[in-house]
Image (cartoon, grey):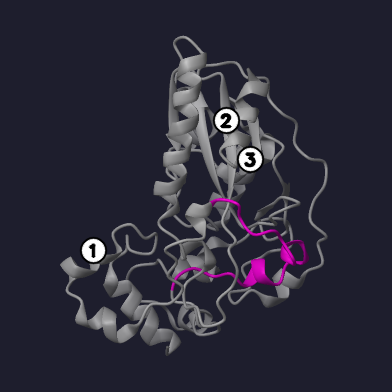
Amino acid sequence: MKTLLKEFCRSINLEYVGIAPAGPYLAFARLWWQQVARNHHSGFEERNFAKRVYPHLTMPEAKSVIVCLFPYFAGTDPEANLAKYAYSIDYHLLVKEKLEVIASFLREEIPGFQYQIFVDNGPFSDRHLAFQAGLGFWGINNQLICDKYGSYFFIGTILNNYPFPPDSPQKKTCLQCGQCIQACPGQCILGDFTINARRCKSYLTQKKGQLSAEELEIMQKTPLIWGCDVCQDVCPHNQNVAQTKLLEFTTNLITRLDGQELKRLSNKEFKEKYKNRSFSWRGKKILLRNLEIVGH
């Protein structure tokens, strides 16, 4: 069945598919507890610590997790003020649609197949699951990296009740050259494969409320108003990576938002125009704030 699954995924242009065990994720638990104790987490994560470690609290019948990588690199626009991951239609929508196709296939093949789909919205660490599924290796910037697409990919998971045999993690890491540490606008990369998420510019572009003087200084170091690509752009593993084969991430691209246009749009008009974009969930007020901060 695992072979059938991977063959089907290849037929819909998903090259990286693996199986993670259905927990418990005790190695992750130790690292996560350390992050929380240091106050280095973003606050966007699942707050129930046990649910992050024990999948059975989410799905009692869980026996495995299908993990898929969705490469999104479609080139770089030097005039962009959005991170590359936000160029396309909202990846949450695109990835969920693909995962539902996989789940429909498995429902036909496996009697009583039950599942839950997650795209950045589950209690688990998607990167940890992808690592457990053998799909990539850790970068010192806390990104997961695969050989063909570098770190330019999204992760989708299907928690399910079928005992797919798990894959094995890769036994290597990035080059640890330190270029990402030196280039990071917020100096949030700590050199031990963890980051202080609260100093990450990508986090700050999504943070509500007044920013401190130090946070403003971090924001002003690069022109992006949503997300941050610096640690990925300087990474040797991301040089000359393949462009995505998934057409969904190569069409309907928006690389730059115009401040004058944003100001003209009412909140209702903004939501209507950008409702299917990953940068829209915070609303136009935060984007206008960020435009003012970076001066573009």
Identify which residue is drawn at 34% across, 68% down: 208
Circle 3 Cα neighbour tier, 10 Å, few/some/many (<14 / 14–19 / ≥20): many
Q: Residue furthest bottom?
A: 295
For the residues marked 2 and 3, what is the alpha-carbon distance in whole angstroms?
9 Å
Q: Amino acid at mark 3?
A: Ala
**From the viewer's perspective, is 6 left or right of 95?**
right
* Segment colored magenta: 226-246
- In this view, the mark in front (1 or 3): 1
State whether the magenta stretch is mostly helix, strand or loop: loop
Whole-percent x, y for residue 131 in the image: 68, 41
Give the image quarter of residue 194: bottom right
Residue 241 magenta-highlighted: yes
Foreground pick, 268 / 3: 3
- 50 relative to 153, above or below: above
Which element is circle 1 on?
helix
CB under 8 Å between discs 1 and 3 = no
Q: Quadrant of the C terminus?
A: bottom left
Residue in the picture at 52% in, 15% down: 109
- Of the numbered discs in the image, which one, if any, rests on residue 153? none
Name the disc covering residue 66, or none.
2
Toward the viewer: 53 or 107? 107
Mark number for residue 130?
Answer: 3
From the image, tell me which residue sits under label 1. Answer: 271
Query: What is the C-alpha distance between the residues marked 1 and 3?
Result: 33 Å
- Residue 35 in view of the camera: yes
- Residue 99, given in percent of the width and then of the height, sits at 47, 36
In which image quadrant can residue 30 be found? top right
The type of residue carrying mark 2 is Ile
What residue is drawn where x is 71% and y is 61%?
241
Query: Mark 2 or mark 1, which has the lower sequence index?
Result: 2
